[in-house]
Amino acid sequence: MESSLGETFSKIVGMTGFVAMTPGHFIMIMVACVLLYLAIWKKFEPLLLLPIGFGCLLANLPLSNMASDAEGGLLNIFYFGVKHEVLPPLVFLGVGALTDFGPLLANPSTLLLGAAAQIGIYSTLIGAVMLGFNLQEASAIGIIGGADGPTSIFLASKLAPHLLGPIAVAAYSYMSLVPLIQPPIMRFFTTPEERKIRMEQLQPISQSVKIVFPVATTILCTLILPGVAPLLGMFMLGNLFRESGVTGRLHETSETHLINIVTILLALSVGGSMTAESFLKLETIKIIILGLLAFVVATSGGVLFGKLMCKISGGKVNPLIGSAGVSAVPMAARVSQKVGSEEDHNNFLLMHAMGPNVAGVIGSAVAAGVFVSLFGTPDPVSHAALQTASHLINPLVP
Amino acid sequence: MSPILSAAFVSLISMSVIFVILSSLIFVIKALVKLMPYVPPAAKPVVSSGSAETSEHVAAIHSALAHYLGKAPNEIQITNIRSL
C-alpha cells in the first residue's frame, strides 16, 4: 500500500508542469510577464499586448498544450484564422468602419506622404537581407515599417510564418512607442519656422464623394495589384458601411463588437505562436533591431517628403504631417499635432495629419500586396482557375 | 544577382508601384470632387422667438460656434435662437 501511494504521488508529481519546465519555457514566461507589465502598467498598446502576452504565457506553460498543433490546442485553432487570412482582413474591416477619409479627400496630395513613409519598409528589407534573411523573410520583417499590426501579421503568416511572433511583437511594441520614437526625428529634420507653418482649413467634401471613393479605390487598386484585395477590400468595405448611411447596424458592429472579438482572437493566436522554439533565437534580436530601423527611416522619409512638399507648395505644407504617413492611426497624427503645438499653441495640425495617416494605411496595404504578388505562393484555386482558363483559351489561338 | 542587389531592385520596383497607385488615387479623388462638388445645405430661416436678436448677434454667435467647434462657418446652421 505504501509503495502504491508513493508511486501515485510520484506519478502526480511527474504529471505537473514543473517537471516538464525547460529553461526556454521559463524565459518565455518571463517575456510574457514583461509584455503584460508593459500593457497594464505602462499602457503600451494594452488592447493588443495584453492578449498577446497572455497568449504567450498560455503557450509556454508546459503540458498545457494550448499551442500544440498535434493535440488540437485552443490557441492553435485560433491560429487557423491567421493562417487562412481571415482575422487580419476582418480587423481591417473594423478599421475601415472607424476611419474618416474626409481629411484625405479634402487634401489628396497628402497621399504622397503616405507613399513616401513606406521607404522604411524597403530600407528594412535591404537591411534584413544584409543580416542573412531571405527575401520572403526580409519582406515580412520590412513591413514592420508600415506601422500596421494587422498588415504585419497578414504578411508574416503568408511569407514567413516561423517569424510571426517576433514580427508581431516588434510591430506592436514600436507602434506603442511612436510618441517616443518620432518627435526627436521630426525635430531633427525640421526648423522651428517650418514647424510653425499653419495649414489652410480643409474644404468640406460631399457625401457622394465619400461613398464613391471606397468603391473606386477597391476597383482601381485591385485591378492594378490583385494581392492587395484581402486587406484593402475589407478596409474599403468597412468604410462603405460607415459612409453609405444605409448599413447602420453593420457599421456599428464592425467598429465595435467585431473588431474587438477579432482583436482578441488575433492577439491570442499571435501570442500562442511565441513558443520558446520559435522565439528564442538570434533572429528575434535582429528583428527587434530592424523594426526600430524601420520606424526611424519611415518617419524620416515622411518628414523629408513633407519638407519637399513644403518647398514645392511655397510653404503651405507643414512638414510635420509627413511623419503621420507611417500609419499607426491615429497616434502618429496626434504626434504631429503635439510637436507642432510645441512651437505654436494655436496651430492645429491634427486633421491635416489624418490625411497622410490614412494614406499610410493604404500605402502599407499596397506594399503588402506588392510583396504577396512577388513572393506569395500561388493560390491553388487561382492556379487551377488559370489552368482552366488557359485550356479554354488555347483552342481559340490559331 | 546578389541578394542585396535583388532586395534593392525589389525595393525600387515596389516603391514605384506604391507611388503610381497612390498618385492614381489622387487623380481619382480630384475627379470625384470635381464631378460631385460639395453643396452646403440650404440654410433654413432663423426663427427668433425673442425680440432683441439682430442679424449681428446671429453672425457673432455663428462665428463663435464655428471657432469653438473648429469647423468652417458654412458647415454650421443656426436654425433657432431663443431668449433665456
Image (tube, coloured by chain):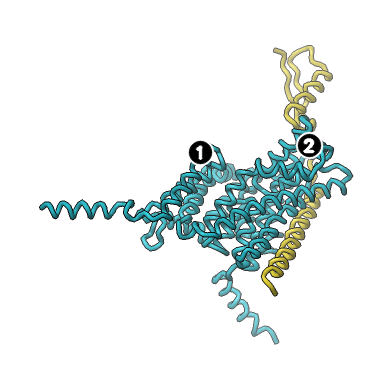
Chain drawn cyan, letter?
A
Q: Residue at coordinates 67% horizontally, 48% vertically from top-left?
A: A327
The chain that hosts pointer 2 is B
Marks 1 and 2: which is nearer the front?
1
Counting from the top left corner in percent of width and height, residue A16 is at 30, 52
How packed mark 1 is, by other alpha carbons closer than 10 Å (few <14, some 14-19, many 20 or more), is: some
**Which tint is chain B?**
yellow
Which residue was labeled with disc 2?
B40
Q: Position of residue A350 (x, y in %)?
A: 72, 38
Category of crowding for the residue at label 2, using alpha-carbon neighbours closer than 10 angstroms: few (below 14), some (14–19), many (at least 20): few
Say which amino acid is labelled 2.
Answer: Pro
Do we see residue A66 in this rendering? yes
Chain identity of mark 1 = A
Which sits in the foreground, A365 or B58?
A: A365
User: In the rendered structure, are the residues bearing label 1 and label 2 in contact, judged by CB atoms less than 8 Å apart?
Assistant: no
Find residue A40 and name its label: 1
Q: Nearer the viewer, residue A343 or B55?
A: A343
Toward the right, the furthest residue is A314
- Figure quadrant of residue B54: top right
Position of A201 with respect to A285 (left or right) is right
Q: Is residue A374 left or right of residue A161?
A: right
The residue at the point 76 percent across, 41 percent down is A187
Query: Residue A2, how many percent across, how many down?
Result: 12, 52
